[in-house]
């Protein structure tokens, strides 16, 4: 019953969002904020040049803020509700909201990423990986998605693929210490297996 209510509510509240996305092109929902790509490009360049971990973390936070901007008040509200439900461990409710985000704004990378994170929290790693792949199709520099992919692959025992994912992550976010550490561990384990 709750799913029907959520879907009905979303259909009523978000009709204008769907219409506007159709009239402005398939990538409109992810690029609705003017100059978004320009700002993100500058921030990613700064992230690569960051000389310290705290500086990199500040830049990464600004990137996350840019990713969070959907360009739609309705989508932003659904994302807020999903986060609140997830924080309260109401994962089914959070999933309903995120499913609506993806239906209404299929080119909004952060919707896919948040759903991947929720799948991961619910121990559904295959679905998490599928959503991560979609996130990366939409935003190849998404360091959160890359970190999630690397962790899933590592835990699955696919060390080579995990190493490649960590290398991609460090290419985008060179000062991420946790990724540096994990890549080092995997490299040591891989060398040990070859001997």
Image: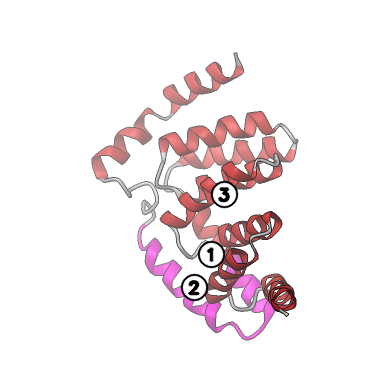
Residue 82: x percent and y percent? 61, 37
Q: Is residue 4 above or below residue 137?
A: above
Q: Residue at x 55, y 17 (%)?
A: 5
- Give residue 119's mark: none
Which quarter of the image is occupied by the C terminus? bottom right
The residue at which mark 1 appears reads as 63
The residue at which mark 3 appears reads as 129
Query: On the rendered structure, is 194 left or right of 17?
Result: right
Q: Is residue 81 visible?
A: yes
Q: Nearer the viewer, mark 3 or mark 1?
A: 3
The residue at which mark 2 appears reads as 44
Callout 2 secondary element? helix
Query: On the rendered structure, is 36 left or right of 43?
Result: left
Q: Alpha carbon of mark 3 to alpha carbon of mark 1: how far?
A: 22 Å
Residue extending furthest toward the front: 195
Bounds of the magenta segment: 34-60
Q: Which quadrant of the structure image shows residue 147?
A: bottom right
Q: Is residue 70 above or below residue 182?
A: above
CB-based contact (under 8 Å), mark 3 and mark 2: no
């Amino acid at each position: 019953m709750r799913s029907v209510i959520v879907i009905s509510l979303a259909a009523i509240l978000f009709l204008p969002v769907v219409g506007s996305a159709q009239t402005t092109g398939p990538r409109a929902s992810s690029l609705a904020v003017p100059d978004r790509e320009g700002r993100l490009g500058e921030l990613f360049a700064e992230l690569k040049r960051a000389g310290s971990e705290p500086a990199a973390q500040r830049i990464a936070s600004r990137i996350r803020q840019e990713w969070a901007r959907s360009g739609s008040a309705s989508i932003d509200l659904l994302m807020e509700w999903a986060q609140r439900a997830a924080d309260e461990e109401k994962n089914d409710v959070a999933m309903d909201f995120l499913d609506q985000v993806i239906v209404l704004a299929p080119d909004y990378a952060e919707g896919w990423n948040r759903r991947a994170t929720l799948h991961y929290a619910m121990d559904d790693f295959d679905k998490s990986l599928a959503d991560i792949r979609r996130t990366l199709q939409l935003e190849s520099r998404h360091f959160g998605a890359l970190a999630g992919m690397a962790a899933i692959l590592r835990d699955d025992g696919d060390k080579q693929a995990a190493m490649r994912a960590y290398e991609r992550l460090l290419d985008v976010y060179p000062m991420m210490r946790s990724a540096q550490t994990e890549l080092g561990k995997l490299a040591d384990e891989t060398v040990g297996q070859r001997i």
